[in-house]
């Protein structure tokens, strides 16, 4: 052996726990933890990205963190759309029942159907 040989350390890359949590909570958002899972996925995803960037290659899992972030943001969008849909359906049901009980129902009853 020569003295000029470089000694390389065998450093294993570990996966960020935050990235794993982000992906799990992003999936859980669609399984049963609606909206809460999305928020947890977004928060842990950004924490994981920050941790991975500061580790200088010692910690991996950027793909898991990005997947958790995407699932989280899509989950937030779906939750907002579903909330708007529920509100619109409730307004439609209430508005329809009120309209059929008032003067509008009298006007409908006066229409000759034969």
Image: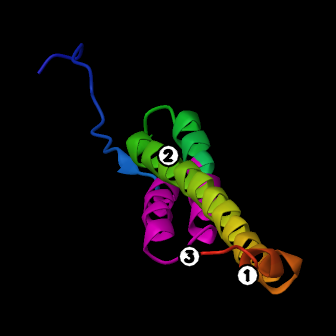
Identity of the residue drawn at 61% across and 46% down: 46
Along the viewing direction, whichever of 24 and 11 lies nearer the viewer:
24
Number of the front mark, 2 or 1:
1
The answer to whether mark 2 and mark 1 are in CB contact below 8 A is: no
Q: Which residue does the numbered mark 1 point to in the structure image?
A: 109
Is residue 44 in view from this perspective?
no
Q: Position of residue 53 (x, y in %)?
A: 55, 34
For mark 3, what is the residue?
A: 114
Pointer 2 local density, CA inside 10 Å: few below 14, some 14–19, many at least 20: some
Q: Secondary structure at mark 3?
A: loop
* Residue 76 shown left or right of residue 15 in the figure: right
Return the x and y of residue 78 as percentages of the image width and height. 56, 57
- Residue 24 counted in the magenta span: yes
Which residue was labeled with disc 2? 70
Structural distance between the alpha carbons of marks 2 and 1: 53 Å
Disc 2, SS: helix
Q: Based on the displayed image, in which of its 4 quarters is residue 88 positioned?
A: bottom right
Which label number is shown at residue 30?
none
Helix, strand or loop at mark 1: helix
User: Is the Cβ of the residue at disc 3 closer than 8 Å to that at disc 2?
Assistant: no
Q: Which residues are magenta?
A: 17-45
Outermost residue to the bottom:
101
- The residue drawn where x is 57% and y is 71% is 34
Q: How is the image coloured?
A: rainbow
Q: Earlier in the sequence, mark 1 or mark 3?
A: 1
The answer for how far apart the CA atoms under marks 1 and 3 are is 12 Å
């Amino acid at each position: 052996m020569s003295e000029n040989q470089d000694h390389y350390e065998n450093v294993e890359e570990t996966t960020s726990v935050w990235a794993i949590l982000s992906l799990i909570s992003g999936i859980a958002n669609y399984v049963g933890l609606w909206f809460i899972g999305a928020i947890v996925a977004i928060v842990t995803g950004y924490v994981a990205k920050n941790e991975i960037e500061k580790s200088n290659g010692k910690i991996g899992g950027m793909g898991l963190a990005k997947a958790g972030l995407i699932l989280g943001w899509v989950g937030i969008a779906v939750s907002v759309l579903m909330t708007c849909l529920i509100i619109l359906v409730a307004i439609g049901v209430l508005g329809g029942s009120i309209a059929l009980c008032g003067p509008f129902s009298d006007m409908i009853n006066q229409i000759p159907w034969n």
